[in-house]
Amino acid sequence: MTDPIEPVVTFIDAHRQRFVDELVTWCKIPSISSDAAHPEEVRRSAEHLRAHLATLGATSTAILETKGHPAAYAEWKVDPALPTLLIYGHHDVQPIDPLPAWHSPPFDPQVREGRLYGRGVVDDKGQVLIHANAIEAFVRARGRVPINIKMLVEGEEEIGSVHLEDLMQREAARLTADYVVVSDTAMFGRGIPSLCVGLRGIAYFDVEVSAHEMDLHSGSFGGGVHNPALVLARMLAALHDENGHVTVEGFYEKVRTLTDAERAEIASLPFDERAWIAASGTHAAVGERGFTTLERLWTRPSLECNGLTAGWQGHGPKTVIPAFARAKVSCRLVPDQDPKEIAAQVEAHLAKLAPAGVKVTTHYIHGGRPYLAPTDHPVFEIAKRAFSRAFGKPTVFIREGGSIPFVRTIADVTGKPCLLMGFGQPDENAHAPNEWLDLENFHLGIKSAAFLYDELARTTHT
Amino acid sequence: MTDPIEPVVTFIDAHRQRFVDELVTWCKIPSISSDAAHPEEVRRSAEHLRAHLATLGATSTAILETKGHPAAYAEWKVDPALPTLLIYGHHDVQPIDPLPAWHSPPFDPQVREGRLYGRGVVDDKGQVLIHANAIEAFVRARGRVPINIKMLVEGEEEIGSVHLEDLMQREAARLTADYVVVSDTAMFGRGIPSLCVGLRGIAYFDVEVSAHEMDLHSGSFGGGVHNPALVLARMLAALHDENGHVTVEGFYEKVRTLTDAERAEIASLPFDERAWIAASGTHAAVGERGFTTLERLWTRPSLECNGLTAGWQGHGPKTVIPAFARAKVSCRLVPDQDPKEIAAQVEAHLAKLAPAGVKVTTHYIHGGRPYLAPTDHPVFEIAKRAFSRAFGKPTVFIREGGSIPFVRTIADVTGKPCLLMGFGQPDENAHAPNEWLDLENFHLGIKSAAFLYDELARTTHT
């Protein structure tokens, strides 16, 4: 007797190109959630996915409304005696600027050398379709999925999952599950199956320094009044000390100290810093003194400036002292930092840095708590097996410097650990121009998902 | 026998409103010289002025081409035995952003409470027409102007008069004169006739810090790579010390020390710092320790940031570490600082401040030398008399923090001192939204110009 997974795998192999075509079609919808001007595109993206899932044997599909952008939802209820898996993903995408840096149009995905280039191809539409395709393979090849599946694909991940907790509380009865899988992270490297067991949290701010009612002539006033651009520069410069430590008072108070075991585990990974620098398109690994690059990215909080705006930004000279200067500032957080506490600390610190005669406004835009998975839970071993079956290699535990604010929420709300099974690549340009998806990984990802469902079907329903 | 100036003054009084209407018409042409997209508007502005001057009895008018924007030129050659006055002005204007801050459209000038609001109304189209109107008054009321007049109105003052020196060298034969008057500055205060005897120079730069080929995800990379926005902030913050001194090596080397007499002269002016702060729309007078506000603005060099650009500047969050960050930086210079020397010092200093692993590019956009007039030359007493006749008050010597790069050039090229007879107000919002012209001052300015020509006619032709 053949392994009943075989026809599923055969189906996945046979439909490899069609799966890519379907991803391209979906990625043509510019579902930028931070763009207040085009909310209808995010809605169109949710509707597109819901309609697609409805053709894949789902027992029900829905659009779940929020106060912001809607989520798409589908269920495959096959047998109450079988375990239920909740799959989380998101269908909104990052903005695309700077547009001139794209080598092909962000919303007309193109294949070049085994990669699909376009906004959302890997973050996160491609990863959502990895699951949809695995489900389709079971439905077409075997008549049904081997476990109960619920798929929740939200539309606000890139703006901090601002309404997801409300939605999950409201729909709690519908969303009960035994296991939760999130596919929105990257693998440690090409061909290395990796389960992400830690995510940093985030706190994001708008900061404005203003000094005059309007721009002043830099000749008539230069040297005699505050310059908000320079005041902002001095304030930003004062947020780190010469060792790369963040100077915000209380910032490190709740940061868990790395154990020797944790440091050893991280050090054991095949991390090639020089290759990482080259692949990132940057020129140096720098940061907090006393920590390795992986420790900095995975286990230490950061404070970054995400954008600057002041005065004249066009071609050539304009001789003004800007009326105001603005910065986007965000912190990545690690256990047990709390975004609201950090927000209060940052706001107080910036107010303290402001000289008399300028007005500093710090606006907390959103935050998300950090996450560390309980890796002693049996689902992690199950997932390792499934992942290794698809890739033919041992699966490693890694962390990720990014944030999925929702992960900590769902872990707390459901009491189930979140399995972070991501299929991205570390250098895939998520959030940057020329985002790309490795098509071989996409294909193996679909198989990994199929194996995961298969492995979960063999567990006892808890 | 009546004073032969009387019919001229009567004509100026009679045509007060028409002169304003003609200024409004000219100011509707958006002659922004820094806007590479619309050079034809600057040309249209030059053509408009030339055509207007041709109707005012000019013996010849011309468009003088440069490698950039053209100048308008006109001559009133009445008698080689009479002295010749060269009038300088400019017909290009500053950019208008931020547009939402304007209370009425910048290029549809509106009168409110005795002020005309619009881009270019005072800087410098209004001041150019002050002379054109005075000339017209002589031509209509007395048949001709009382001296020979040449008027050169360039189109690149707001971008540093980049081609003016070339133009003046080329047209040297045409531009010979006994006296030179420049009307592009402000009076010390409302109703106080003032001759500006000092201007600061300028050196203007584009500065770019880049660290990656493209924006990086601030989660995946935050804390582990250079952040160009923060690196730029640290570099800008390091350009002043805690006493407000510029830290650029060699910056003060050629700065002339203020004499006790100069400090006393400045201190004797009726300067109300609190009123100046309120009128400026700012909230504090701050700057280099050890100097008063007027000393800072008039006699000390400054270094300002005129604009900042980096990463995400839209609404809401975007989690990137910008690939690059840019600043517009400019210095105001005082005798005997040289813009090219300062440019080299600033470039070297910024390069020294840059950490390893980032690329810093400093591009010197343009510069102009500072100017101090030889106030013992007789033309300054002549001008004081003319100015005081129009305003009925003693005329004071002042300086100006701004720059007219051309002034130093023409003073050197012609060997004649430049008379800086300006009719602006210190709080007129030149270079900012809601630029305005005091219409009473405009009117008295026309009379002042008429009196100046009248006084010059009485001098011996040198």
Image (tube, coloured by chain):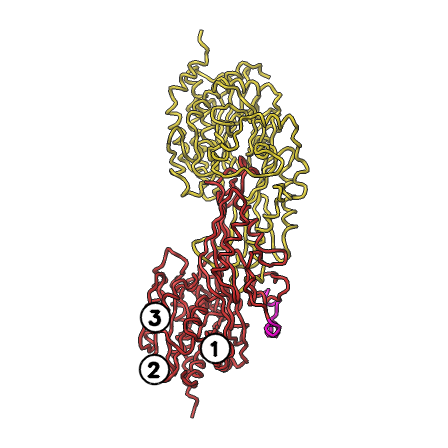
Chain colours: A red, B yellow
Instruction: From the top left corner, tell me how far across and down residue A221 is, in percent.
Output: 53, 36
Label located before the other in sequence (1 or 3): 3
Q: Is residue B336 above or below residue A22?
A: above
Residue A136, quarter of the rendered image: bottom left
| SS type, badge 1 | helix
Q: Which mark is residue B117?
A: none
Q: Which mark is residue A444?
A: 1
Q: Amino acid at mark 3?
A: Glu
Classed neighbour count for the residue bearing mark 1: other residues with Cα under 10 Å, few (<14), some (14–19), many (≥20): many
- Front position in the image: A437 or B152: A437
Q: Is residue B75 above or below residue A321?
A: above
For mark 2, name the chain.
Answer: A
**Do the residues bearing badges 1 and 2 touch, measured as CB atoms within 8 Å?**
no
Label located before the other in sequence (1 or 2): 2
Q: Which mark is residue A78?
A: 2
Examine the residues drawn in magenta and state their main secondary structure: helix
For mark 1, name the chain.
Answer: A
Foreground tag (1 vs 3): 3
